[in-house]
Image (cartoon, rainbow, N blue to C red):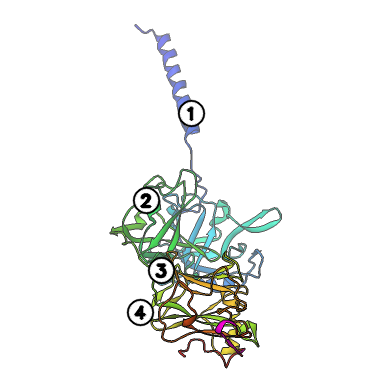
Amino acid sequence: MVQMGDRHRFNKVVFVFSVLVTVCFNSCVKTRNYEQPPNDCTSNLTANSTYADVKSLYKGDTFQIQDDLIIEGYVVSSDEAGNFFSVLYFQDSSVNPTEGFQIEIDVRDSYLFYPVGTKIGIKLKGLYLGKSKDVFKLGATFTSFGNVSVGRLPAAIVNEHVFRICDEEVFVEPTVITIFDVKKELTNTLVSLTDVEFKEEELGQTFALAGEEIERILVDCNDNEIIMLNSGYSDFQADLLPEGRGSVTGILLRENEDYRISIRSVLDVNFNQERCTELVDEFTSENILITELADPDNNASARFVELYNSSDESLSLKGWSLKRYTNASAEVSSEIDLSTLTIDANGFIVISPNAGEFEAVYGFPPDLGIGTNSPADSNGDDNLELEDPFGKVIDVFGVVGEDGSGTNHEFEDGRALRKPEFLKGNGSFDFNEWYIWNDSGDMGTTKQVKIAPDDFSPKEKD
């Protein structure tokens, strides 16, 4: 039986315990930073400047804007899933934007106050404008080792610069593009990349690693690539990358000429198609051959190498290379990667060591301009090999390991021209397939120097 004194002591203990629990609970719960602008809007703010006008103020150094300028935009980013942190990305139109911008703000859960599709106005006076890796940023000032750059705008004054406009939230329509269509003007805007998939080597991995920012590679069916940037603090970081192919919607980011895309949530990834079939874009053909070599007596800068495609279809030269063996060397002295070129059906490609001089002499630009000491810059006693993507020598001029001087493959101060009846490459040099002029006339060659441009015929059938 509990006596009155005991009951009093019991109630006192319960009260103290309750107080302690309450204090402990309130002190142990991690609170978010809610020093954010209030969830209200304004109708008394009108833009008086464009993004281009603002960017034109920048003269090379981070500076504080002193004019009463106002810009407007539509929010396209969201930190709800944790893949963005302390930054708002916005663009100048909800459909077909011409430019995007970003402002650094020290506000967590900004999506609660600036949801995607919200129209915002920004008072620029007092903000800093800077540029990092060729991308403009707005915010406060940040100094490190004497260098001034744009930093996060303190939460307490965000509502002095960033305002919600009292319009209904709109659907921001992403600009639909392919990886190939990515361009500078779309930086910081919402885009939807079509026909993409994660690179095969990435499959089976997660979007990111806990606490680490991770780059994953997206590719299209033509092997074009772009980086997807994922935060290790996002709520989807531990999700496995989806297989299949489809579209990815996100903010197009850029560092100089390198582009990236960052999604708002996994809902931005819509892979509902089968993966691309393996792209076969490397070909071999005996119909690609060396047809002219030039070492003009009057102008060493007008040298060139001509290749010809004798087939009735254009061929990609992805993986092809042209190698030079200088004098008697049995080791490759220099090499040209021809991967960027496509050679038309019954067409020519001309490679020059001096593109400007070539155009000045012959009246048109070469297909590829390469530096001196390259395979296109032989002085007539070197040996050349044309190799396909699989390492097979398709055509050769000269004898590797033999100095051309005084031989039947010397074209010093002259010209080597493939006889027109020979339309396939030959992995072994055959003097009978060539007309060769030089300054010596040895071993059956013709002693006659050649003068540019009249004695040469780049891109012409002789």
As displayed, is residue 352 above or below residue 113? below
In front: label 2 or label 4? 4
Which is more N-terminal, label 3 or label 4? Answer: 3
At label 2, counting other C-alpha atoms closer than 10 Å, the crowd grade (few under 14, some 14-19, many 20 or more) is some
Mark 1 and mark 3: Cα distance apart in space: 47 Å
Q: Which amino acid is tagged 1?
A: Cys
Mark 4 and mark 1: Cα distance apart in space: 79 Å
In front: label 1 or label 3? 3
Q: Which amino acid is tagged 4?
A: Glu
Q: Secondary structure at mark 2?
A: loop
Q: Which residues are magenta?
A: 442-448
Q: Which amino acid is tagged 3?
A: Ser
As displayed, is residue 201 above or below residue 258? above
The structure residue drawn at horizontal position 44% and vertical position 13%, both measured from the top left corner, is 9
**What residue would you read off at disc 2?**
203
**What residue would you read off at disc 3?**
94
Residues at circles 4 and 1 in contact by the CB criterion of under 8 Å: no
**What residue would you read off at disc 1?**
24
